[in-house]
Image (spheres, rainbow, N blue to C red):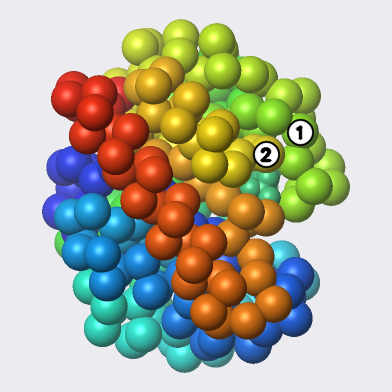
């Protein structure tokens, strides 16, 4: 996904901080990046830094600390919410509907995104959360690289959450979205396979990737990424685009 034609598919690992397993950010990240050992083309290449409780300075510091580890592993780092930290240190940003509304005010989203593209480095990725079909249709006219869609199921990792959308709705959205669809919310191994079958390009996870040690995180991430990769390969068809 470094180029703006996202052929990427697989596990989208979210490093949610503070880490629920109690690990330091670098240790949790090292666990997630262990999946690169199964080969970049067979592994998740995306890690998102989601640090909702950090202030801008701390998030920027975390992004700068973690980005070299992610790059050294051949993966990509996306920063949640924080355009400035993402542009300074990472490969992309993930924005939600509320993030966009706050950033754009009265301005059309297309105009603000065009400005972001001009300011951002080449290949900078922009992801947008969607929760309804109307939002997916709106996103279809926006210059974003992928959409998140969910929560597919209820999640324990986000307090204020939209209603769960389910797998049937995911399948419909995957057929109508011109952008790759990253499913999110309440996903584990079984659910991720259902997302792949529904046509999702990726499955994003927080809780399923939490462990009390780096080795435990690594084992979870590797198992999930491998299962997802096999399911996608078995489908033998491109994901939603
Ligand atoms: C891949 C992906 N999809 C959706 C989200 C959620 O973003 P948002 O709706 O802005 O909520 P927060 O994560 O910021 O609380 C995501 N982070 N990643
Ligand atoms: C950030 C976010 N946005 C929608 S669901 C969710 C949390 C996903 O976490 P989990 O994989 O633990 O359900
Ligand atoms: Mg957000």
Disc 2, disc 1: CB below 8 Å?
Answer: yes
On whether ligand 2 comes within 8 Å of the CB at mark 1, the answer is: no
- Report if residue 13 is visible in the image: yes
Q: Could you tell me residue 60's position as x and y percent?
A: 54, 82
Sequence-wise first label, 2 or 1: 1
Within 8 Å of ligand 2, the CB of disc 2?
Answer: yes
Q: Nearer the viewer, residue 180 or 238?
A: 238
Q: Residue at x 45, y 32 (%)?
A: 193
Q: Does residue 238 appear to the left or right of 92 in the view shown? A: left
Q: Is residue 32 left or right of residue 71?
A: right
Location of mark 1 (residue): 154
Q: Tag on residue 186?
A: 2
Helix, strand or loop at mark 2: loop
Q: Position of residue 23 (x, y in %)?
A: 67, 83
How far is mark 2 from mark 1, CA to CA? 6 Å
Q: Residues within 10 Å of mark 1 (few under 14, many from 20)?
A: some
Q: Is residue 67 above or below residue 110?
A: below
What residue is drawn where x is 75% and y is 52%? 157
Q: Is residue 33 above or below residue 153?
A: below
């Amino acid at each position: 996904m470094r180029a703006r034609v996202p052929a990427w598919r697989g596990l989208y690992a979210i490093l949610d901080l503070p880490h629920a397993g109690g690990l330091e950010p670098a240790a949790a990240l090292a666990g997630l990046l262990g999946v690169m050992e199964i080969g970049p083309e067979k592994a998740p290449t995306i890690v998102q830094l989601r640090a909702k409780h950090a202030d801008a300075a701390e998030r920027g510091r975390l992004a700068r600390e973690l980005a070299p580890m992610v790059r050294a592993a051949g993966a990509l780092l996306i920063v949640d919410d924080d355009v400035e930290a993402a542009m300074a240190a990472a490969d992309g940003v993930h924005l939600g509907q509320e993030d966009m509304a706050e950033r754009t005010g009265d301005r059309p989203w297309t105009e603000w995104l065009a400005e972001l593209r001009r300011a951002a480095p080449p290949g900078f990725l922009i992801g947008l959360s969607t929760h309804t079909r109307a939002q997916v249709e709106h996103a279809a006219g926006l210059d974003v690289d992928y959409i998140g869609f969910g929560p597919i199921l209820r999640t324990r990792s986000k307090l204020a959450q939209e209603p769960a959308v389910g797998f049937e709705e995911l399948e419909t959205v995957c057929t109508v979205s011109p952008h790759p669809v990253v499913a999110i919310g309440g996903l584990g191994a079984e659910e991720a396979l259902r997302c792949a079958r529904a046509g999702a390009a990726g499955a994003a996870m927080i809780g399923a990737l939490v462990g009390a040690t780096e080795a435990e995180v690594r084992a979870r991430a590797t198992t999930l990424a491998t299962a997802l990769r096999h399911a996608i390969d078995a489908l033998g068809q491109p994901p939603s685009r």
